[in-house]
Amino acid sequence: MNFDESLKYLYGLGNEVSAMKLGLENIGKLLTALGNPEKNFLKVQVAGTNGKGSTCAFLDSICVLAGIKTGLYTSPHLISITERIKINGQDLSEKDFARHATKIKEISESLLENGDLETIPTFFEQVTAIAISAFDEAKIVLAILETGLGGRFDATTATNAEIVAITPIDFDHQNILGNTLTEIAAEKSAIIRKDTRVVLGNQSEEALEVILIRCDEVGIKPINDCKIELDAIDSTNGKAIVTFLTKNEIYHDVHLSLRGRHQIENARLAVLLAEVLKNDFKFTISKFEIVEGLETAEHKGRLEFYQNILFDGAHNVAGAKALKDYLDEFIKQPITLVFGAMRDKDLWEIAAILFPKAETLILTKPNNERSMETSEMLKIVPTTFNQKNVKLAATVADGIITAQKITKETELILITGSLYLVGEAQEILKKAF
């Protein structure tokens, strides 16, 4: 298959969430058929609710600067599927992606034909296998893997990572993971095994209790000993200047590259993970490289500006709260909010958090089968919002055009509600990127 053919094939397997089948059998047999290449390098698996991708981005930046041959696997992508798989900080090429996708497709179909599998592996399972295959071919020594959904049955869990991190746990995907933080934490903490090093983000009491019980069950003492001193917040860009204090080192006045106070916690986790790699697995990582990595990391679509447009993939309640906090502190001009979201999210609560920040609200529908219809989205608009300032856009392109027409250059267009929306919007505007 060429690149376009590989995309057609993979997307033909169904939406990565709607058509998802939780379980490790398919991915396990895929990896076995590949010769278990995941055993050829060390793995860091990052689970949690929000902050997974940013934590991975910080850690990847540190490791690449340190000269460690590193593979990074994240999801979802914004514009190109190749964004999900990076080697030494660079996206996998379309040619290499297609080549590995062809190999995984052939193995998957052979396993199905021989009766070793009951169903063809899903989109996420096959893309995970593509990443592992590409990492092995590139002879990486470290893979950083962002959990897709949950933990217990996520495809990345089949790699048996030696190091795991759990970012703050909150509500998301309740229809799959459970309706309480206890249930959600149980699914995510299931990645903790007796032979893992565990780094914890700050958790609610309810989630922390579940995680600590899991750690106790397998005889693991989690790592969370990194204090934070907030030195300042740059009022011009919303980026924090922080000092991190671990039991091993003090990292003074680190100018985080990613915007928002919530990134402090993600950076803290990355510092702890880097120290585990350095002290427990003997990777050569200097203090300078840790600081420089935190100050240069990139993570597109998360509080990312282009001219007077702000992109943020706030797709759940915790993400909406973090975005609102940023807007409250740093954005003073009127906001035109372009909003589109998946229908399986807590949209009433997200709307109650974000919509009051807007002067004008443009509701649109991303090109995704899980997207909520704009007519349905009208129901989540608070009754207190000026209905004259609510507009419907049939497509994301229409929404952007409308926003640009009614928003002055000194005002802000905020595009949020889903990373799928952000990705589609950036694809439309990609000539500017």
Image (spheres, helix red, strand yellow):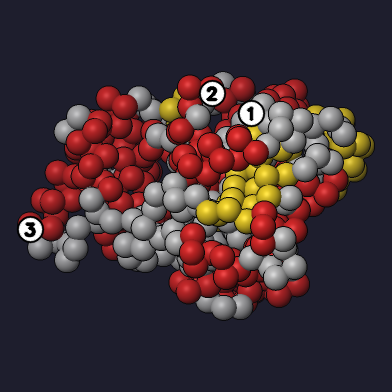
Secondary element under disc 2, as helix, strand or loop, is: loop
Checking the image for residue 114, the label placed there is 3
User: Label 3 amino acid?
Assistant: Asn
With respect to residue 420, does 211 lie above or below? below
User: Label 2 amino acid?
Assistant: Phe
User: Label 1 amino acid?
Assistant: Tyr
C-alpha distance separating marks 1 and 3? 51 Å
Please name the residue shown 44% across and 58% down the image: 371
Q: Which residue is mark 1?
A: 306
Please name the residue shown 36% across and 58% down the image: 369
Please name the residue shown 62% across and 56% down the image: 390
* Disc nearer the start of the sequence (1/3): 3
Residue 343, visible in the rendered structure: yes
With respect to residue 189, does 411 lie above or below? above
Q: Quadrant of the N terminus?
A: top left
The foreground one among 186 and 177 is: 177
Q: Quadrant of residue 118?
A: bottom left
Checking the image for residue 14, the label placed there is none
Residue situated furthest left in the rendering: 114
Q: Say whether marks 2 and 1 touch (CB < 8 Å).
A: yes
The foreground one among 46 and 309 is: 309
The foreground one among 416 and 262 is: 416
* Disc nearer the start of the sequence (2/1): 1
With respect to residue 395, does 220 lie above or below? below
Q: Which residue is mark 2?
A: 433
Q: Say whether marks 2 and 3 touch (CB < 8 Å).
A: no
Residue 195: x percent and y percent? 53, 57
Name the mark nearer the viewer: 2 or 3.
2
Judge from the rendering whether residue 32 lies leftward or rightward of residue 362; answer left or right.
left
Q: Residues within 10 Å of mark 2 (few under 14, many from 20)?
A: few
C-alpha distance separating marks 2 and 1? 8 Å
Q: Say whether marks 1 and 3 touch (CB < 8 Å).
A: no
